[in-house]
Image (tube, grey):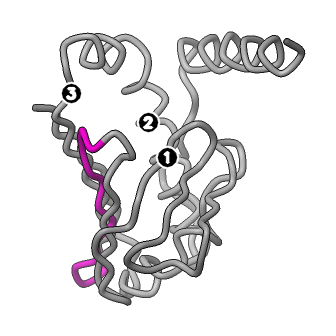
Amino acid sequence: MIRNVHSRDLGVPAGPFVDRIQELWPPAWGRQEFDRPLGVGADGGHGPIRYHCTEYVPGSSITFEFSDRDGTHTLSASGTVLTHELIGRFALARRLQWALVIRWLHDACLEDFLDGCERAAGREPAAPARWSPWVRLVRRAFGLLMRQRQRA
């Protein structure tokens, strides 16, 4: 099992930021789009990542299950702290993909998201996220692969 957690103290009540997940999602990682308003039963995701909303408590938490049902990710608020937790029950091949590529992209995406939340809360992040050379390389390679697939 893989567990990956990102938290940020926003300095203001974090609950409203759960409800603003789509608005504050960093555009560099693909718009978050759903087939209906955000809530239980909504299907969608961002970029190539697809998921289904399984729980939503406005102002508190939202949980999504990956479309292949091999894990969940939850955004939750507790006081001034906003937390994202991914739980993956990945098969061996997916665990290797996670270790080599997905984890790095996921971490960069979540830190960009939390930076945006902090800015929306009215302050600049103390240490804004920066993409590592590996993240930039993988994004560039992935972008080229996506363009090639679209041409085919």
Q: Does 147 sit left or right of 63 as displayed?
A: right
Tell me which secondary structure the magenta stretch mostly adopts: strand
User: Which of marks 1 and 2 precedes in the sequence?
Assistant: 1
Task: In the rendered structure, find residue 90 and report the number of the disc placed on it.
Answer: 3
Residue 113 drawn above or below residue 132: below
Residue nearer the viewer, 43 or 94? 43
Return the residue at label 2.
Answer: 106
Task: In the rendered structure, find residue 50 and report the number of the disc placed on it.
Answer: 1
Q: What separation in Å lies between label 2 and label 3 (alpha carbons)?
A: 15 Å
Kindly check if marks 1 and 3 are in contact, taking CB atoms under 8 A apart as contact: no
Q: Secondary structure at mark 3?
A: loop
Kindly check if marks 2 and 1 are in contact, taking CB atoms under 8 A apart as contact: no
The structure residue drawn at horizontal position 89% and vertical position 15%, both measured from the top left corner, is 151
The structure residue drawn at horizontal position 34% and vertical position 39%, both measured from the top left corner, is 68
Instruction: Assess whether residue 79 is covered by the magenta stretch.
Output: yes
Residue nearer the viewer, 62 or 13? 62
Q: Furthest residue to the right?
A: 151
| Amino acid at pointer 1 | Arg
Q: Which residues are magenta?
A: 69-80
User: Which of marks 3 and 1 precedes in the sequence?
Assistant: 1
Q: Secondary structure at mark 2?
A: helix
Q: Does 113 sit left or right of 6 as displayed?
A: right
Snapshot quadrant of residue 53? bottom left
Badge nearest the viewer, 2 or 1: 1
Residue 137 drawn above or below residue 91: above
Instruction: Assess whether residue 74 is covered by the magenta stretch.
Output: yes
Q: What separation in Å lies between label 1 and label 3 (alpha carbons)?
A: 15 Å
Q: Does 144 sit left or right of 61 as displayed?
A: right
